[in-house]
Image (cartoon, coloured by chain):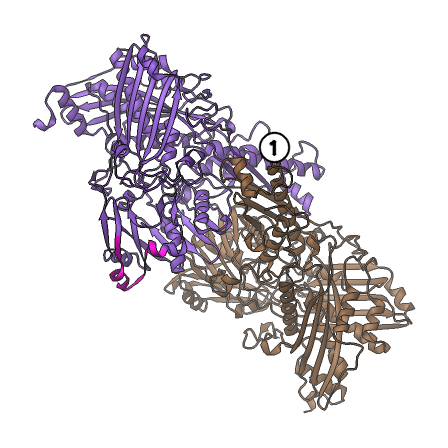
Chain colours: A brown, B purple
Amino acid sequence: MTVNPIGGGQIGRSVPRLEAREKVTGRAEYTHLMRLPGMLHGKIFRSTVPHGRIKSIDVSAAKKIPGVFAVITAEDVVKVIPNPYYGPAFHDQPILALEKVRFVGEPVAIVLAADPHVAEAATQAIVADYEELEPVYDEVEAMTAKSYVHDELKPAGTFADLKHLKGQRNTNLALQAKLRRGDVEQAFAKAAHVFEHEFRTQKCLHVPFEPFCSIADAKDTHVTIFSGTQGPSFVRAEIARLLGWPENRVRIKVPYLGGGYGGKLYMKLEALATACSMIARRPVKIALTMEEQFYLITKHPATVRIKSGVDKDGRITARKCEVFWNGGAYADIGPRVTHKSGFTAGGPYDIDNVWIDSNAMYTNMTPAGALRGFGMPQLTFAYESHTDMMARALKIDPVEFRRNNVLRNGRPQATGTILKDAALEPILEHVADRLRWTEKFDRGSGTIKRGRGIAFALKACVSPTTSVAIVNVGADGSATLYISTVDMGQGSDTAMAQMVGEVLNLPAEEVRVIARDTDITPYDMGTLGSRSTFHMGHAVRLAAEDARGKIAALRREVGEPEGSNTPVSGLFIKKYGMKAGNIVGSGSYKPDYVAPDHDTGLSPEITPFWMVAGAGAEVEVDTETGRVHVAKLVNAVDCGRPVNPRIVETQISGAALMQLGFTLFEKINLDSGQITNASLADYKIPGIADVPPIMINEAIDAFQSNAPFGAKGVGESATMPLSPAIANALDDAVGVRLLELPITPEAVLRALRVKEGRPLDDD
Amino acid sequence: MTVNPIGGGQIGRSVPRLEAREKVTGRAEYTHLMRLPGMLHGKIFRSTVPHGRIKSIDVSAAKKIPGVFAVITAEDVVKVIPNPYYGPAFHDQPILALEKVRFVGEPVAIVLAADPHVAEAATQAIVADYEELEPVYDEVEAMTAKSYVHDELKPAGTFADLKHLKGQRNTNLALQAKLRRGDVEQAFAKAAHVFEHEFRTQKCLHVPFEPFCSIADAKDTHVTIFSGTQGPSFVRAEIARLLGWPENRVRIKVPYLGGGYGGKLYMKLEALATACSMIARRPVKIALTMEEQFYLITKHPATVRIKSGVDKDGRITARKCEVFWNGGAYADIGPRVTHKSGFTAGGPYDIDNVWIDSNAMYTNMTPAGALRGFGMPQLTFAYESHTDMMARALKIDPVEFRRNNVLRNGRPQATGTILKDAALEPILEHVADRLRWTEKFDRGSGTIKRGRGIAFALKACVSPTTSVAIVNVGADGSATLYISTVDMGQGSDTAMAQMVGEVLNLPAEEVRVIARDTDITPYDMGTLGSRSTFHMGHAVRLAAEDARGKIAALRREVGEPEGSNTPVSGLFIKKYGMKAGNIVGSGSYKPDYVAPDHDTGLSPEITPFWMVAGAGAEVEVDTETGRVHVAKLVNAVDCGRPVNPRIVETQISGAALMQLGFTLFEKINLDSGQITNASLADYKIPGIADVPPIMINEAIDAFQSNAPFGAKGVGESATMPLSPAIANALDDAVGVRLLELPITPEAVLRALRVKEGRPLDDD
């Protein structure tokens, strides 16, 4: 190995995924497939009421069923974990329901048995009695409701901006994030036009193909947890906190994940599995069914009220947004979604006066958390629909209207942070170009109408967060990278190996990646918010550079001249007298960040980088059925310099197709708090037939100047602009505007009938 | 945590072993207990002749047995590993016998089956035909025999002093290590007295209670091997070499070991398991029975010819030693045993003229390797018996004779290296004191005669060797240590945790030790030769100091005043804005070393430290049965400053009791190359009834000035002087001198009868 200062040629290579062969040959390890000796299976008994006080839980019959090892309720849990409440933002969620239940499906008890079928059957023999309380479901109504999901707010203490909420009572508002820039009311008064709309998005599911699964093996002095989690370092710290143990007694090992999408962040089944294992003194596995995923974590439904003032030249001068996030019964990371997406609710526009209230609401539904985009797709659906509606009303071409208002590098974003390395305008032009926006367009005929829509968006990265990496170079010159980044299909192991290879001048395929085991791999805040390429990328770069520096020092120490070609293995032999030793490099990274002002939300440094994405859609609408067929879909992102172009392309297409489901058909239906379509038979996700016949997925030529090798994240980007691009295309095709997702045939047909003056109900 | 320059109070504490609870509750993991999904069991078909050319191996019948997955011979092995020869000193040992067999019990073929009983049964159906060759068994005869175990010598290239042997033919001499100091012949000529004796020691077994076991799981691009090995870094490198892969594709994971004693060093079953797994494309486990251990590795039998010249004042002026080591059919680490013990064959005496030839011989027996003492117990039996014999002949008190000749600190040892921090004289005086040497002694009556004996010894440490350690401090201040040192019962995990605690001012119990996994833990030359406390101790100290330095730098970086009491977790929060991040410290250690001159064996720096031990025995000899009962046993060692006094004490007692078996009864019996007592029913090891009723195990007050915290190794020390102390006590009791081990009742009785002029055969 020679150290090549101009780089090892590994960045920008479409290296096949390191784990591909293991996965396609079925040898890759997933938590769902694992069994430990003596392991018990846990099956959960769940609440049947949305809100209630627990009067009694009778487990006596279940305990008598042959093969049942134990039946555990909160009463047992508190004997091993006295304060069993957890959560990243609020310590609001009990390991098993304690005193109250807050949503239908909440875990109330768990049966342990060697045979999972016995455990499942025994849950049927448990009887719980509740004093029912008034439930609250709607995120807007929750603000004024007189029934409260929680008696008292319990901030976790992790986030400074939540501390003031401690002990607040009689509220369903978990967090209100504000942004105040300029004077919107004055600007509205002066505006030539004022537009105001309200949008709503639905409750959706992550649907990782590997459902949630955790195995805990608690010993007297330490616990090992195998879990399909995106955040092993977080889970480790949180389990340690619950147990009152130092973190080095808690080991979180993460096999491969069968998808995550934000759903597998923070604590999910790990605390319950740990409590069970401590009580049973056996390894305990809890593996959810597909159906049970509906009762664990979902996407936030949101209501977005958006109001803009536009001057006579078509420039947006003021924007007011009021956003209500339906966080369900437990906050999970909802308050962060509320805050982080909140400050970009004004969109990718250069607006002097911005007023935003972003409200995290508790309701009596399955909790909501992060889902690929961290709230941005909900907001973007609102603001980019709103943008088109204004353009149409003003009879300005929607691309031209955006071009007139786009935020440019060097200008302050709503928070005051100066935009840098964010290719908003190029993305807009690129999508318009790919759609041949200015060319003549076939608008269809008969009952099939055709239309086009465009949207684009800007997302900040969650900050400040830390990543640490270790690079170990062995005596034969081979390198091993240690990271806690979770490769859940996004290709992080491969991308990080490329970075090590780039610095150490090794082929990426020869870098061994050891990942996702907190006993071994150093701290990482979590694999979320498209942060890994940038944050862990920096840590990996620093660790590899540290190793490279130590190799250079070894070269000098053993008396090799500068620029000698002696391979690394030769240096070790010179130093140690035999093939022995290691060089250990480490790197830590945390980007600069200035916390936003509590009252104004302003900050000169709110994010280390901006993610930018644009989408363009051509749709065919069947006016007889209301069906919207996406004939062509263009997805374009700015991810800086792609580390692995092929993986970037699959990230774009994957994100877009996922959002296509949320746009056209996915929705969790609720009836009095009961989910009525909790199965993949009833809850449809996109299949191969839903893929647009023409789909273009592109990263534009870009470079993030403060990033490792110019690269930034891309996992979420293409989710952001897709829904409004389709809504805008629908309007363009048939002149109806849907303010709510999903854009189902029924909704379209209903809107068409309303437009024609004959509502659907008339049929 | 505050950094306390005077230390954390962890050294010298008898911390209970960290793994004690896991072990006593049966939850500790051993390779023998492990099963992987789809795993096959391998059972070995072995040679029935001691030396022969393979004419044919018929596996057809075995293959047809239902349940047999595969039957593998060398022909299959070479398809996946073209050059299947391995070994630390010579690449002489094939994975399965190729062309020739060289000892009875050598693996010739292996049957794989899901059911180990099926595999075992199928080995009976294999038929091999050999052209038998003349065998050689005796280590002295091997020197002049005309039959050669190997056609050609194949040095591994690892050791510079073996390179000149490459390609040598027509020899059974694998290595001759010489030491030439002064002029012995001239000194003998001038001496007042010259004594010459020949001693022999027997072939013995390590008998770890967990027999050897390895599991290999070979994938296309990497292999994971679970193995009870003392040298994971060595096995990794050697497997990588055999496969032609970089080392980072080979993972050696070592669960707990049920004992090692040097037998589990270097390659044992790992290469065979790997070849099988590559061929079968399944995980393969090879677990030996107790009986099969007799065909894997043993202790070296040795013949020691020793001649001394003594002047009129009782000073030893010259010593000549000729040592023949019976290495068996494959060299394993025998040449190192030969060399490293060779240069101390002169004993713990200050002798101006020394001549040593130490010869590593190939023979047609089970290979011999390291066994707790690395050759020293064999040598010490010889030279400390010889010492007593001279003292008795000269009518000088044996303690006084030793006192007159002892090597003192500041004086050159035979190699020329100046003795330092070696408490030879204090150990001698301590043992004499504990035996009340100068007081009146009850010499028994009737048929029970009582006697006393003393011996002491000096051992160099194997050099130059390297150890690397990593210490990771988490955001809550808890620390994790990564080392490849193998805790096989000697307590290394606990001792190393104490060293980390000492530097970082944490209780040792709170330091988590991650050990023995080459994907994770950095390089270590091996857990052997009592080197870990010193070598890995230094690496651990350096790694912890590196971490401590980085903590101090972090303290400065976040603006904490020097000496502030803010805990480490507080520094992380200040730096990262939340409980995040790690500090990674690493340390590498290799002691200074000057390779001995090829012709004279002299070196000014042959070892980083000296191990010293003394033993004193009081025995009762039954003159009617020949039984020797050890009534009192004193074991004293200089291990510098004990890190964990309680563990040191158990190391002393364990080593002494092990050597007691080798002294009084353990012996592998051979008949025409066939082992006739290959079972624990016939091969007796010490039981509770063999423990001397009075047994004193002590580390004397000492400090090794160049050692980490003043501590050096102790695992082997007490094995060295025990056998001659008992042989000397026997002579003292009944006036007979045994020149060969073991000292069985039959041998004693025979010697008594010879002394009385009526040989045993007369009965």
Residue A242 counted in the magenta span? no
Q: Is residue A59 left or right of residue A457?
A: left
Q: Is residue B725 left or right of residue A52?
A: left
* Corner quadrant of residue B386: top left
Give the residue furthest to the top.
B312
Q: Nearer the viewer, residue B613 or A661?
A: B613
Q: Nearer the viewer, residue B15 or A491?
A: A491
Count the numbered circles shown.
1
Q: Nearer the viewer, residue B381 or B602?
A: B602
Instruction: Give percent across and percent down for residue A402.
Output: 82, 70
Instruction: Give percent across and percent down for residue A360.
Output: 70, 62
Identify the chain of the residue marked 1, using the numbered disc in the image: B
Residue under the point 47% across and 56% down? A276
* Corner quadrant of residue A625: bottom right
Q: Nearer the viewer, residue A7 or B233?
A: A7
Q: Tell me the crowding category of disc 1: few under 14, some 14 to 19, or many 20 or more residues within 10 angstroms, Cα based.
A: some
Kind of residue sitting beneath label 1 = Val
Span shown in magenta: B55-76
Asked whether the viewer can see residue A731, the reply is yes
Instruction: Give percent across and percent down for residue A638.
Output: 72, 63
Asked whether the viewer can see residue A198, the reply is no
Location of residue A267 with respect to A314 vertically, above or below: above
Determine which residue is flagged by label 1.
B3
In the structure shown, which secondary structural element does the residue marked by tag 1 occupy?
Answer: loop
Q: Is residue A155 left or right of residue A196?
A: left
Looking at the rendering, in which quadrant would you find the C terminus of chain A?
Answer: bottom right
Location of residue A375 with respect to A537 vertically, above or below: below
Instruction: Give percent across and percent down for residue A567.
Output: 57, 44
Residue B63 counted in the magenta span? yes
Location of residue B362 with respect to A99 vertically, above or below: above
